[in-house]
Image: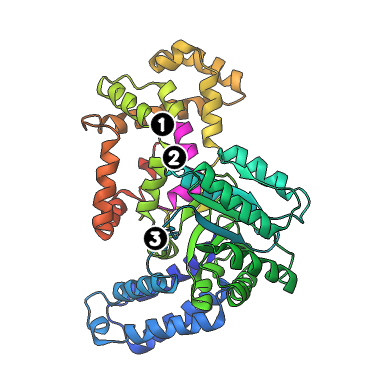
Amino acid sequence: MAFEGLSERLENSFKKLRAKGKLTEADVKEAMREVRLALLEADVNYKVSKEFTKKVTDRAIGADVMESLTPGQMVIKIVNEELTELMGGNEARLAIANHPPTIIMMCGLQGSGKTTHSAKLALKLKKEGHRPLLVACDVYRPAAIKQLQVVGEQVGVPVFEMGTENPVHIAEEAIKHAKDHGNDYVFLDTAGRLHIDEELMQELQNIRATVHPNEILLVIDAMTGQDAVNVAKSFNETLGIDGVILTKLDGDTRGGAALSVRAVTGKPIKFVGTGEKLGDLETFHPSRMASRILGMGDVLSFIERAEQSLDEKKAAELERKLAKNKFDLNDLLDQFEQLERMGSIKDTIKMIPGLGSKIRDEDIDEGAFDRFRAIIFSMTKEERAHPEIINPSRKRRIAAGCGRQVEDVNKLLSQFKQMKKMMSQFSGNKGGPKVSKKMRRLMQQNPEMAEKMMGMTGGAKNNNPFGF
């Protein structure tokens, strides 16, 4: 995952500051030297890292920090605020046309994920009640039109194409089509190249001059590091982009592009691709990303991901079962499926304040759900509904049926009992899914207080029913 190396380096630097009861100017400068090295190792632009550490140093050596009872925490607070500002301060939203449709021009180099992320963004808007249209303006790359049609079908969004006609003409006709058919967003999937050239830029300028897009979004690959920032700078100078979609932020990238692109181009990151699935697209929140980089978690994104993934009907049904103490292994299977829809266990845990920074990747077993599922599938219907009847002979049969050990069956049953006991504590809450909405409002009003509350629940590994 992006920023892992940076987070670790920053955490080590801040440990030294927190250990000191009082800070000197030399202590701050030494810590900032380590921070700058950490940023450079994360592939952050040299000028950006230098200016960033200068800003933090100037603020940190002020009297309000030096004379504070917790100077180390004050420095971390300043770093958090400056990181947030570096990445744009507030989230940047898509433009909305006064008279529909809103025209979004997607551009980028070949292989950056432009076509896929056009579909991802269209899907996101469709879920919000909009009627997007995808337009195939890449008439050069083999199978580009077919690829857009495939992803369009997968997300249930119509695709407009006219074969290998002039891309400018295709864009014009697509907008007429959108007006006639009630599409309120039009995504122009333009052609890319392996590198920036005059022919590519001229075509994009021609499309811009003809259809006057409300928004020009540049799709760049976070894995390319500083090259991504250079690409963003070139496109912005030539075309005038309005924002950036950063892809592959879930990959083994150092994350420097996310920290540099706003400072270098002056344009915000609006969305980030966090996985290969078409639903893996998130709005970019600078404050949340800063918190994750500093190991403080990301409570709001955690709740949003949960609300999108969890089935409200099943949640209400589960609450009724818990109230009657009838939670069984079939319900546990449902919980596994809903948790898996939230994405990687590793990424989800890292969003929880006080927990993500304390658990190492090697402590997280991504295959645990598959093993537990195999064990449950080896049981009879009666055993799933009434786990208390599973005696030693049944355990041996179940273990043999799924190729596991009896100890694994015992572990599942033990963790099931823990989870049942833990979940029954919440069975008194009325309203089911409404609880999460109340919590969401609380956290939006006071995220710092909410993070402290969530942080109190993290870090106790033995309390986790899955043993993470």
For residue 201, above or below residue 387: below
Q: Quadrant of residue 190?
A: bottom right
Taking the view exactly as shown, the residue that stands out farthest to the top is 382
- Which quadrant: the C terminus? top left
Q: Which residues are magenta?
A: 336-352
- Front one among 286 and 415: 286
Q: Are marks 1 and 2 in contact (CB under 8 Å)?
A: yes
Q: CA distance from mark 1 to mark 2?
A: 8 Å
Amino acid at the residue labelled 1: Gln
What's the magenta bit mostly, secondary-structure-wise? helix
Location of residue 411 with respect to 388 vertically, above or below: below
Amino acid type at mark 2: Gly
Q: SS of the residue at dot 2?
A: loop
Read off the residue under disc 1: 415
In this rendering, the label closer to the viewer, 1 or 3: 3
Q: Disc 2 marks which residue? A: 467
Give residue 372's position: percent from left, percent from top: 51, 29
